[in-house]
Image: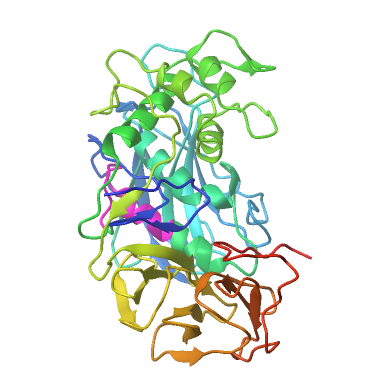
Amino acid sequence: MRTLMLNPNSIFAAATAAVFLSVLAGCGASSVQPVAAPVVTLAGVPGVAISGQVHGGEQPVVNSRIYLYAAGSTGYGSAYPYTSGTDLLGSHVVLTDSNGHFSVSGDYTCPSAATEVYLVASGGNPVPGQTANANLTLMAAFGPCNSPAANANTFVAINELSTVAAVYALAPFMTGPANVGTSPANAAGLTNAFSSVNKLSTLASGSMPGPALPTGAVLPTAELNTLADILATCVNSMGGSALGGVSDGTACGNLFALTPSASNVYPADTVTALLNIARNPSRNAAALGGLLTPTPPYQPALSTPPSAWTVAITYAPSGLSGPAGVAGDQQGNVWIANKTSHAVTLLAPTGAVTGTYAAGVTGSGAIAVDPSGNAWTPGTGASLIEIPAGGGTYTSYSGGGLGTTNALAVDGLGQIWATGSQNGVSLFTNSGTPVSSTAFTGVSASNAQSIAITPH
């Protein structure tokens, strides 16, 4: 079986016998136990009670401050502009007790019932008798603000594993622990990212896998545990820093010195350090593995660090047969061109197979999705086929000097560009009409294998 690994900014990729979701997950035990919490009144939303427990390396964190953040909707990494700041709890201070427990007893207002929210634990003392760690930051993705409305109480476990799950799933939308948001046009993408956390982590235990993990999916357990163990080296300490990239010799300083952003800005908290790992997975990969203690808390762990901390959920749903091309639409669905069966498989954002279309009539493994969500793929011979958004009966098109097509691309106008044996490029409108009766040959393309559209 051939495999293909993705970075966290990808969505899906296909290989000979498997599909990989570019989100992180793992497993690990936690000893947290639910405690009662009072019902919180939400403006215009059914009451939701929130309680939980914060652990660092499976040790309770004392006097950690709890923040409840809502995702922004004005741009990637934007924060929701709550009247008292970005924290929905406003001036109400929630701290963990001597067992790491917390409960939200102050009122907060959901921006809307569907607004995605998440919890962050900042600071606190994970080791009895030790100075509080100002660099300790952990998080857990809560989901839609009213998602637990059916339950009398909602218990949330926050630890390194819940942090790994949340950060790797939300990395394309994050700039830091208080900034998770999307552009106004990509609300579906953010919703899918929060939903992915439920595949990776269980809200009530902070352990992996999550309850929504697709059947048959395989998690890179040891790698995910190892990432949590790397965070734990800093979390279970008195903190530290990296000034100009030089560690002060502490566990946190060592972590921060190895985890700068792409622009060489060094982190000062564990969530930002992990976010930088997710976005730059090959940077200092081996050295990060060297930070592990002899007996890390989350097991099993990797004995040798990978060349890059790029991880994925791996699974092979039914219907795939030599997947060779993949494309995602605006709703988070994934279209896969199967080269062996000459068919197109459509997967929902959850990973479930929606259907198989155009069986026996597709050509190469090329596939592209237009702005309306329709999928385009080469038909057998000199033709293109269009499968409507969401799946259905295909339509075939020809002309424009089209030959056997190797590659497809869709531009901002929804036009389809095709290249292959025509030794040029054929161009079709979004309605399937050839723009020219012959291929454009001035590009000197000779049986080209790929094509891409650049921005204007």
Identify which residue is drawn at 54% across, 25% down. 135
Q: Residue furthest right?
A: 456
In percent of width and height, residue 158 lies at 38, 39
The number of discs equals 0
Question: Which of the two residues, 27 or 92, is positioned nearer the viewer here?
Answer: 27
Decide: is 243 above or below 270: above
Question: Which of the two residues, 146 or 313, is positioned nearer the viewer here?
Answer: 313
Task: Confirm whether residue 157 shows in the render.
Answer: yes
- Look at the image and give the residue range highlighted in magenta: 194-211
Question: Which of the two residues, 188 or 236, is positioned nearer the viewer here?
Answer: 188
Question: Which of the two residues, 260 or 98, is positioned nearer the viewer here?
Answer: 260
Q: Residue furthest left?
A: 216
Quadrant housing the C terminus: bottom right
Asked whether, in this view, residue 190 is left or right of residue 227, the answer is right
In percent of width and height, residue 63 lies at 45, 28
Decide: is 107 above or below 235: below
User: Was residue 204 drawn as part of the magenta stretch in this picture?
Assistant: yes
* Secondary structure mostly taken by the magenta-highlighted segment of the chain: loop
Identify which residue is drawn at 62% across, 71% down. 423
In percent of width and height, residue 28 lies at 25, 36
Task: Confirm whether residue 145 shows in the render.
Answer: no
User: Was residue 362 drawn as part of the magenta stretch in this picture?
Assistant: no
In percent of width and height, residue 150 lies at 30, 67
Q: How is the image coloured?
A: rainbow
Decide: is 22 above or below 284: below
Identify which residue is drawn at 53% across, 38% down. 275
Asked whether, in this view, residue 263 is left or right of residue 227, the answer is right
